[in-house]
Structure formats: C-alpha cells, structure tokens
Image (spheres, rainbow, N blue to C red):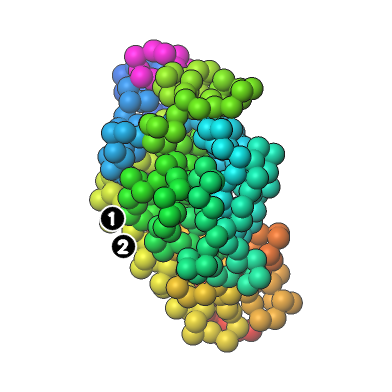
Amino acid sequence: MSRVYNFSAGPSAFPESVLKQAKDDMLEWRESGMSVMEMSHRGKFFSTIAEELESDLRELLAIPANYKVMFLQGGASAQFSFIPQNILNGKTKACYVNTGAWSEKAIQDAKAYCEVVVSASSEASKFTQIPSLANWNIDSDAAYLHYTSNETIHGVEFQSIPDAKGLTLVSDMSSNILSRNLDVSQFGLIYAGTQKNMGPAGVTVVIVRDDLIGHAAKGVPPVFDYAQQVKNGSMLNTPATYNWYLVGLVLKWLKAQGGVAAIEQHNIKKAAKLYDVFDQSSLYSNPVEKSVRSRMNVPFILSDEALDKPFLAAAEGQGLMELKGHRSVGGMRASIYNAMPESGIDTLCEFIKEFERTH
Ligand SMILES: *Cc1c(COP(=O)(O)O)cnc(C)c1O
C-alpha cells in the first residue's frame, strides 16, 4: 500500500494517525465489546463519544458558555435555508456579502425566505478580492449579516472579522474552521460542514448564540429547528454516529498538535511555501489579491492551458492527487487543510518547479 498526497477540496485528506486509530477501534471501541457503528446513540458508550466531541470542540475554539453547539445533517448547504428559517425572527431582510461561489449559493437559497440585501460583492473582480469594508451597505433593518470566511473555490479568505455594524454576524466557515484563531463571541452563528477541515462528510457543526434559538418560522421541519435540536442534544433523530466519532478523533488529533494556535502557525508556513513558488514562476500564477489569499485553498493557473493535462498526469504519477481546479473556474487548486503535512507541500513545490524546468 502506498498512500498519496491528496489535495482534494472535500472530502479531503485525514491525519493518518486518525485513520489508524479508527482501524484499531473498528471491531471494539474502548472495551465496549462493539464497534462504534453498532452502538445505540442513546447508550452509555456513545454518550461518552458525544460528550467528548462537544467538549473538545468547545475547548479548541474557546466557545463561550452562552453558545450552543449542534452536530446536524444536510451539509452546510442545508444551513443556507435553515439559517433564515431559524433566525429571521420576524424580520424580512438579511444582508449577505458576495465573495464567491459559496456566498452566491447561500444568497440564492436565502431568497426563498427573505429579501436579500447584497451588502458588498467582489464579482466584478471575478472574486479575486474582498470588497473594502468602508463601502459595505449594511441595512440596520436586516436580521443578520452573512459572509463566507473562506471561499473554497475561489481561494479568497477573510483575514479578520468584518464589522457587522451592530447586526448579528453569521459565517459559513466550512473550509477554514479550526485552521486559525477565532473569537467566537463576535458571531451570532457559525456553521461548517465537517468534510474539509474536521473529518468525513455527513456532519454539519452549528455554533449558535443562545438568544438566536427558539424563533424558527412556522413549518420548519423539527429536525432543522435549532430549538428542538439543542433541547435534544442534536439527537432529535438518530445522528450520524460513526461520523461524530471520526470528527471527535480529528479534534483529539488537533489538540495533540497543540490546538488551533499551533496549527495556524503551521498553516501560515505551508501556504507561504506554496505561494512563493507561484510568485517566483513565469509559468504559474495565483489570481487572488495577495492580502486575501486563502491558507486553505490555493488556486493556480498555468500560462499555457495546453499544459493542464500533462501537468495533472505527471502530478498523479508522483502521487500528488486531486489538483484539478473546480469545474466552474478551471485551472488547478491545491487544498491544504490542517491534515496536509508539510512534507506534502514540499513534495508538491518540488514537483511544480521541476515541471516548469522541463516545460
Ligand atoms: C463545501 C462547502 C459548502 C457545501 O458543503 P456541503 O456539505 O456539500 O453542503 C458550503 N460552503 C463552503 C464554504 C464549502 O466549502
């Protein structure tokens, strides 16, 4: 067996030690006599897994006591609809910042429930920038301001928390949660699918401030009513038990790495190595404005499109997988989440330079 370096945007690479732990636990978890997959979600063994999952996440992100944490299904995409349905609370407008493909989807879905005020957009720059905060149109009658902290497809990342001018701040952090320090208290609600930086697909983490819970619109399905899920510990229905366990293992791995502050330093170093190679090259370029480049998703283009296919084929030949860019933007993309080791970055950088030398 030889494992590759997997640069997939999601589902994405796991820490190898987590996979080994899952293998060791497969037939029997901690002297329970059974696999996690076989456990009742209401039994004592799984209760331990659920409790550790939440407490480890709370510890890693220093989540204040007045926030609830849910582990739901339906992906971040379901939250595009369930956020307005849960937190509009009688208001008819919500503000959205449009910085790329995922913002656009969130905006599109919210329109079914409210009037969307697009506070700012970087569409004119083909989503290679973040609109300057000075010009944002924030409507004080809106229920909240939504933004995507890291645009997974366009490779644009907010480097600080925007000022919501008094509105409740909501953020889709699917592709950069746990990759950098975060002051949760600045937000009303944070959500993230787990398949980028926290584990396998199938779980969506929602962190929500107490006062936003309990205002679901009429007709919201009970499993997507925050109040009901909070009251039931995200077990109103059977949760994705094995996925919760895997996310829990990833969180324990992250704690062992020194937590979020330590992994952030590691991520800064990894991303800088890769961007440096592009900046010094005449074959490759990264289209994003330097100050907002993502540390997680690094898109790059080859100046000669005819080289795309040979590039990908040669990369795969060396065990460097999933470097093809998203179909909507083309080019290449290397997703380098927490679990991508520095050796993967080094191998990729060497390959990229060598390909330029020989082409
Ligand atoms: C992947 C992704 C999503 C969609 O996640 P699903 O789990 O497929 O619904 C939403 N937002 C961002 C920023 C993403 O990276």
Residue at coordinates 64% horizontally, 41% vertically from top-left?
114
Q: Percent x, y for residue 217?
A: 59, 27
Q: Percent x, y for residue 229?
A: 47, 23
Image height of 8 relative to 207, above or below: below
Image height of 221 relative to 271, above or below: above
Highlighted magenta segment, given as a residue range: 38-47
Residues at badges 1 and 2 in contact (C-beta under 8 Å)?
Answer: yes
Tag 1 secondary structure: helix
Residue at coordinates 64% horizontally, 63% vertically from top-left?
325
Q: Percent x, y for residue 179?
A: 39, 54
The three-letter code of the residue at mark 2 reads: Gln
Q: Is residue 113 visible?
A: yes
Does the closest atom of ligand 1 sit within 8 Å of the Cβ of label 1?
no
Closest to the observer, 250 or 173: 173
Total marks drawn? 2
Mark 1 Cα shell of 10 Å, populated few (<14), some (14-19), many (≥20): some
The three-letter code of the residue at mark 1 reads: Ala
Q: Is residue 344 visible?
A: no
> Does residue 213 appear left or right of residue 83 in this picture?
left
> Does residue 245 appear left or right of residue 104 in this picture?
left
**Does residue 205 belong to the magenta stretch?**
no
Residue at coordinates 46% horizontally, 36% vertically from top-left?
206
Does the closest atom of ligand 1 sit within 8 Å of the Cβ of label 2?
no
Residue at coordinates 58% horizontally, 79% vertically from top-left?
284
Q: Percent x, y for residue 25?
A: 39, 28
Residue under pointer 1: 261
**Does residue 44 belong to the magenta stretch?**
yes
Badge number at residue 35: none
Tag 2 secondary structure: helix
Residue under pointer 2: 265
Residue 80 in which image quadrant: top right
Image height of 180 relative to 218, above or below: below
